[in-house]
Amino acid sequence: MSSSATPTALSIWWHASRPATLAASISPVVVGVGVAAHLGSVSWSRSLAALLVAVALQFGVNYANDYSDFRRGADTEDRVGPPRAAASGLVRPQVVLGAAVLSFAVAAAVGVWLCAVTAWWLLAVGAACIAAAWFYTGGPRPYGYRGLGELAVFLFFGEVATCGTVYVEIGRVGVLAPLAAILPGSLAAALLLVNNLRDLEGDRRAGKRTLAVILGPKHAFRVFLGLLGLALSVPLLIAIPGLEHFPVFLPWILVPALESPVRNAASKDPKLQVRALAQIGAVLAGSSLLLAAGIWAG
């Protein structure tokens, strides 16, 4: 490889943050703001704080995953996709670990402020979020190596983030928030599943038993389709309790945009599966924004 093609430290850090997955942290907060606006009012300072917490946790879990996977040998040179910070050799593993800790510290600091202006019991929720982020691939028994990653993503980047945003805005949750949270949670889990489909062979060799490794590519792809279907069902679920105005069905505008990522995810070509990651991330961001706008208008 020529020197001009050698990645810089800055580009390594950017890739290690996995920008294609950042929609997973931003989207549930956007949906939560839409629900809060429909049910009561919006505090933009609290919305911004909730967004900072979510994004900092996303950076933290990505850097922690980078560090832990490298230490366990799950990062290999034949991996297809953006380079990892530790595996690239340009960033020392302890520095990557420090970046993860710093990200978690930022999330904790902003979270404490949110607790101070809302309710202190939310500290327990924040602690659970940080613990889930670290033990995904860290600790002696990481649950990400036991096929539970998608479930955790659905819960924390769907239900917890959306309902938490609504609570810090209006002091209650209600029925609408957990129903709306299914859309970003399902698509975020689908995003992780595509990532694990791409890394299936390398994860299997490293002993990392993700859901894709446990089920195999055929059945894992069926789960992926099921997650997309679950996300698309959310407007109908929301309409049942009475929010029947047509704007809540705005996410269905993006149904045709799913054809390409579904085809790429089904491919045996890891490069096309990398492309599917970015496409699913875009659908996640777009559909969450449309759902939030539809709920707000409804």
Image (cartoon, grey):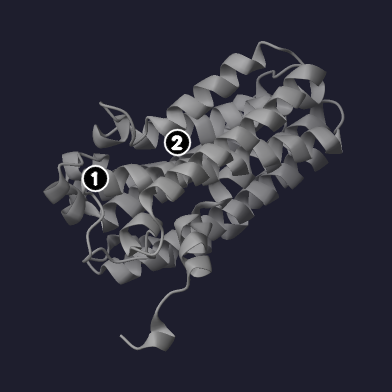
Q: Could you tell me which quadrant the N terminus lies in?
A: bottom left
In the depicted view, which residue is nearer to us: 203 or 106? 106
Q: Which mark is residue 164?
A: none
Give the mark count. 2
Labels 2 & 1 near each other (Cβ < 8 A): no
Circle 2 sits in a helix, a strand or a loop, which is it?
Answer: helix
Label 2 to label 1: alpha-carbon separation: 15 Å
Q: Which mark is residue 212?
A: 1
In which quarter of the view is residue 54 placed? top right
Q: Position of residue 108 (x, y in %)?
A: 63, 29
Q: Residue at x 15, y 42 (%)?
A: 207
Residue at position x 24%, y 32% in the image: 146
Q: Taking 24 as reference, is 234 above or below it? A: above
* Residue at screen point 60% across, 25% down: 178
Asked if residue 281 lies left or right of residue 290, the reply is left
**Is any atom of residue 228 visible in this view?**
no
Q: Position of residue 138 (x, y in %)?
A: 34, 33
Instruction: Indicate the amino acid at tag 1.
Output: Ala
Residue 153 got which mark? 2
Extreme residue toward the left, this view: 205
Q: In the rendered view of the protein, which quadrant contains the C terminus?
A: top right
Of mark 2 and mark 1, the one earlier in the sequence is: 2
Q: Secondary structure at mark 1?
A: helix
The image quarter containing residue 28 is top right
Q: Say which residue appears at 55% left-offset and 60% top-offset.
A: 282
**Which amino acid, mark 2?**
Val
Which quarter of the figure has residue 238?
top right
- Residues 229 and 162: in front is 162
Is residue 145 or residue 233 the one in the foreground? 145
